[in-house]
Image (spheres, grey):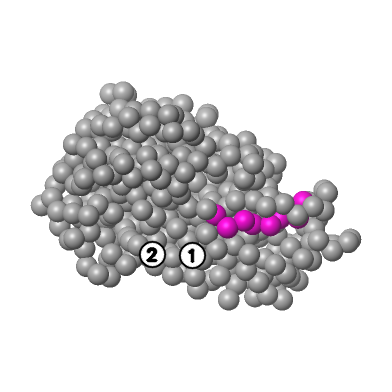
Amino acid sequence: MINAVTRRYVDRCAEAESPLRNAARKLSLPAVYSQSFGQVLLDRPLFADRTETEEFAGDLRSLFTLMTSLPARLYGGDLRAYCAAIGMDDRLAELMCRGSVQPPVLHARADAYHDGTRFHLLELNAGSELGGTDTAQQNRAWLRVPEFAAFAEEHGLRHLDTAPRVAAALRRAAEPVTGGEPVVALIESTGGLAAHEHVFTAVREAMAAEGITLLLGEIHELAERNGKITLRGTPLDVILRYFVAGELLDDPTGQQVLDTLIRADREGRTALFLPLDSGVYASKGSLALLHDPAVRAELTEAERATVDRAVPWTRLLDEGRQYAGDRAGLLARCHAEREELVLKPGVGYGGVGTVIGHETDDAAWAEALERAAGGDAVVQRRVRPAPEPVVDAATGRTEEWAANWGVFVDGEGYAGGFVRALRPGDGAVISFSNPGTRSSCVFTAD
């Protein structure tokens, strides 16, 4: 978004011999974080209006409260019935509902676009397995560059570090288990650590700065001794879960371990942060349900206003669900408005399986809609992100980038943010699965 701070920063970077232009080349990042992200940094931070950002986080809290109230309001408290209504695979739903705790703890990150007017929620990643929680290491590095520090002081720039909020949540989870500093382990699925080792070592580095020693392990390395979960023989107070339900579907041993974790959590021996049930509300089908006419009729006026303000029009395509609405009319709209729509799997990560309407022709779009029938796919109104001008430190040219804003939110509200950015010519899916994507941090200003 081109706000006043952005305009001033870009103008100064465009000046000849600008000391700000090369600030990104002077960043001194912690060793592990630098190895992980030092080669994919954008040439400037992004700037957001503080009040607007906090208000959007407030809407996210309201949406989470709304979504988590619907199983009781519409399905008599039956979470499995709710999962069926959002098109979720039965096997996946069964796993997610194991150890369900209602209402679930709010620990989430929104992926959002800003269209120049306001933020629009694309998906809400709810649960403990959130990427980007260590991004404030970028903020601190920027503030150690004198030229940027002077600019930040001049414009009252601030940032909120997500890592202390995560550390506080882990300590709260540990309170029923231990009276001292908790022993915490980040646990991935089998093979998951090796696939993303740089990410997890950077998280461990950030947690160490908060006084938490974070062990790293995989689910097959866990065992039980006297009711307490152990990792390679070390008793654990808290499991920071980074494995997801889909990774356990065809892993009977992993499912047995999951049941052991749930039992240890219920008995107060080792806390599980968090159970898999948060993933139910991370499904884009949960956003689609909020736009179904039959569901909207059950919402209050204030709830409908929050949905309309924060969530672009999103609908579930499956014709067999209780709240399917007029499928023929829905499909007709999908065909007619192809260039303004995006087709996405309800449960998915990194843009995998996404079909961009304006990047396909009518025939390919029709085929994609047909393939999506009977599953959990949703169609969502396209949001055009406002361009973010960035002065290239090497060439001095100003280029436009599109930004995917990661906005963290917990029970206290806004919990920090970060950005993934992509040149529009490099594609429409802004994710690190796209090699053109760059990382940046967020500063807010009044």
Q: Are marks 2 and 1 in contact (CB under 8 Å)?
A: yes
Q: Report if residue 86 lies within the magenta region.
A: no
The structure residue drawn at horizontal position 64% and vertical position 57%, both measured from the top left corner, is 388
Distance between mark 2 and mark 1 Cα atoms: 9 Å
The correct choice, above or below, for 238 with respect to 46 in the image is above
Q: Is residue 269 visible?
A: no
Q: Point out residue 48 in the picture as x, y percentages from the top left corner.
A: 57, 66
Circle 1: residue type:
Arg
Crowdedness of circle 2 by 10 Å Cα count: few (<14), some, many (20+)?
Answer: some
The correct choice, above or below, for 39 with respect to 12 in the image is above
Determine the secondary structure under disc 2. Answer: helix
Q: Report if residue 391 lies within the magenta region.
A: yes
Determine the secondary structure under disc 1. Answer: loop
What segment carries the magenta color? 385-392
In this picture, residue 225 sits left or right of residue 90: right
In this picture, residue 437 sits left or right of residue 12: left
Give the tally of numbered discs.
2
Mark 1 lies on residue: 118
The structure residue drawn at horizontal position 24% and vertical position 52%, both measured from the top left corner, is 292
The structure residue drawn at horizontal position 77% and vertical position 51%, both measured from the top left corner, is 392
Mark 2 lies on residue: 309
Judging depth in this view, the residue of 75 and 29 nearest the camera is 75
Crowdedness of circle 1 by 10 Å Cα count: few (<14), some, many (20+)?
Answer: some
Judging depth in this view, the residue of 407 and 194 nearest the camera is 407
